[in-house]
Amino acid sequence: MSTDALSEVLSAVHLSGSTFFEVTAKSPWVAEAPPAEQVTRELAPGAQHTIEYHVVTAGSCWIALVGDHASEPIQLQEGDIAVVPHGDPHVVSSAPGMRAEPSLDLYRKSKEGDEPFLLQTGGDGPGDARLICGFFNCDVRPFNPLLDSLPHFMRVGRDASASHGLLDQFIRFATAEIGNKRAGSQSVVNRLSELMFVEVIRLHMNQLEITNTGWLAGLRDPLVGRALTLLHARPSHAWTLEELASEAAASRSVLADRFTQLVGYPPIQYLTRWRMQMAARRLADPGVRVAAIAHEVGYESEAAFSRAFKKFVGRSPAHWRTGPI
């Protein structure tokens, strides 16, 4: 039941897969990705954020974050999937510890021809790896609880994907579509990548420790998950903490404490934030009146909604419509 909230968030933040590289690499080889905001400006100027991922379809390689959230190199084997949710610069290479000069030239070249962009790189050694490298675009403003709850690096190993057929199927289907290049292949691969990301999120959620906090930890928690599902099912309802606790089968104090501990703020404050994300999405349609949006997200008047929106977002609904910051 709680997966409905995940679906709602993925839809509301406009998650979409796009732009792919199929890489064949021979030793020695190294590629360093610049920060995602640079990639976003180059590939999807209208997007707010870019999430990068790498799927190893053959061989192995190493990956490490660099910059403010630098990490130790991690080896990726055939069937592994690595996701960089927050757009950190990172290095993918044939051996640990290698570095290269980040460049946007590859991303620029990818726009000149049909996707996926085929890349052969490296030296004259053996073929170390084949990868599918891709991107998801999504909104981060005014509120993306999912992204806020993800770590800077995620890896799903072959051992995990072996028991979760969707990931295996993604790799097989995506490889076949990229190789055949039939009509509509790019759209198929885009949708497959989105399904892959959802499955990666599910696996990550299932592997969270009991001590973890964040939106996904709340979604997995029996009590907080019920409350989140209720809020997402009826976001325009005039919820009170007492009514929400009653329907979630808990006392007000227990729900408020547990919800705040896991999600980071009380239930009604979360509801306000979620309403603002819903409203921002609707404001993207210039044909919908602000008064109608106010009613849709649970406000009795346009004035009350406008005050709440400006307080949370820092801009009036009309100003937001001129272009989200």
Image (cartoon, rainbow, N blue to C red):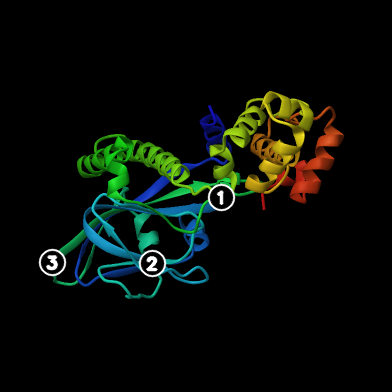
Seen in the picture, residue 25 relative to 264 is either above or below; the reply is: below
What is the distance, in whole Å, between disc 2 and disc 3 at their CAs? 22 Å
Judging depth in this view, the residue of 243 and 271 nearest the camera is 243
* Residue to which mark 1 is pinned: 149
**Disc number for residue 126:** 3
Residue type, numbered disc 2: Ala
Q: Is residue 172 left or right of residue 316?
A: left
Label 2's element?
strand
User: Is residue 295 in view from this perspective?
Assistant: no
Mark 2 touches mark 3? (CB < 8 Å): no
Q: Is residue 141 left or right of residue 172?
A: right
Judging depth in this view, the residue of 291 and 74 nearest the camera is 74
Label 3's element?
loop
* Residue to which mark 2 is pinned: 64
Residue type, numbered disc 1: Ser
**Disc number for residue 309:** none
Identify the image quadrant of residue 65: bottom left
Q: Is residue 188 left or right of residue 295?
A: left
| Residue 257 drawn at (x, y percent) | 71, 43
